[in-house]
C-alpha cells in the first residue's frame, strides 16, 4: 500500500478496510468496502466506468428560473398599464 491513495479510495483504520466512493454531479456514489487495496482499485475503475455513462450536469441548468404566472412584461410596459388603469396591479 502506498502512502497516498488515489482519489476515491479511503482507508478506514478501525475496521481495517478500504472504502470506495466518488462524487458526480454533487452526489456521492458508494461502491462498497473491500479488505484489500487491489480489490478497491478494481472497484474504483468499475465505478468510474459507471459514472462516465451518466451525463454531467451543466452549470447553466442549475440556475434555471422558475416561470411564474404574472402580469408579465418589462418595467416600461407595466408603467404604461398603470398609467392606463391604476388599479391593474391591485386585483
Image: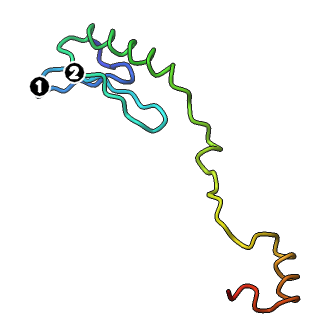
Q: Residues within 10 Å of mark 1 (few under 14, many from 20)?
A: few
Residue 6: image location, x then y, percent: 37, 19
Identified at 75% across, 91% down, the residue is 87
Q: Residues within 10 Å of mark 2 (few under 14, many from 20)?
A: some
Q: Is residue 36 left or right of residue 56?
A: left
Disc 2: which residue: 33
Identified at 83% across, 90% down, the residue is 85
Placement of the C terminus among the 4 image quadrants: bottom right
Residue contact at pointers 1 and 2, CB within 8 angstroms: yes
Q: Earlier in the sequence, mark 1 or mark 2?
A: 1
Residue nearest the viewer, comparing 91 with 39: 91
Q: Could you tell me how far apart the alpha carbons at marks 1 and 2 are, in whole angstroms?
A: 10 Å
Q: Kindly report which numbered mark, 1 or 2, lies closer to the viewer in this rendering.
A: 2
Residue nearest the viewer, comparing 46 with 9: 46
Residue nearest the viewer, comparing 3 with 50: 50
Q: Residue furthest bottom?
A: 86
Residue 85, disc: none
Residue nearest the viewer, comparing 1 with 10: 10
Residue 55: image location, x then y, percent: 55, 27
Seen in the picture, residue 16 relative to 87 is either above or below; the reply is above
Secondary structure under badge 1? loop
Q: Is residue 6 left or right of residue 80?
A: left
Placement of the N terminus among the 4 image quadrants: top left
Identified at 32% across, 13% down, the residue is 43
Q: Residue furthest front?
A: 91
Residue 81: image location, x then y, percent: 85, 82
Secondary structure under badge 2? strand
Residue 15, disc: 1
Amino acid at each position: 500500500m502506498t502512502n497516498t491513495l488515489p482519489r476515491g479510495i479511503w482507508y478506514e483504520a478501525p475496521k481495517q478496510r478500504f472504502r470506495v466512493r466518488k462524487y458526480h454531479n454533487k452526489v456521492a456514489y458508494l461502491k462498497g468496502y473491500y479488505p484489500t487495496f487491489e480489490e478497491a482499485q478494481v472497484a474504483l475503475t468499475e465505478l468510474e466506468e459507471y459514472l462516465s455513462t451518466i451525463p454531467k450536469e451543466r452549470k447553466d441548468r442549475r440556475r434555471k428560473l422558475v416561470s411564474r404566472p404574472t402580469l408579465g412584461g418589462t418595467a416600461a410596459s407595466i408603467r404604461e398599464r398603470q398609467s392606463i388603469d391604476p388599479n391593474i396591479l391591485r386585483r
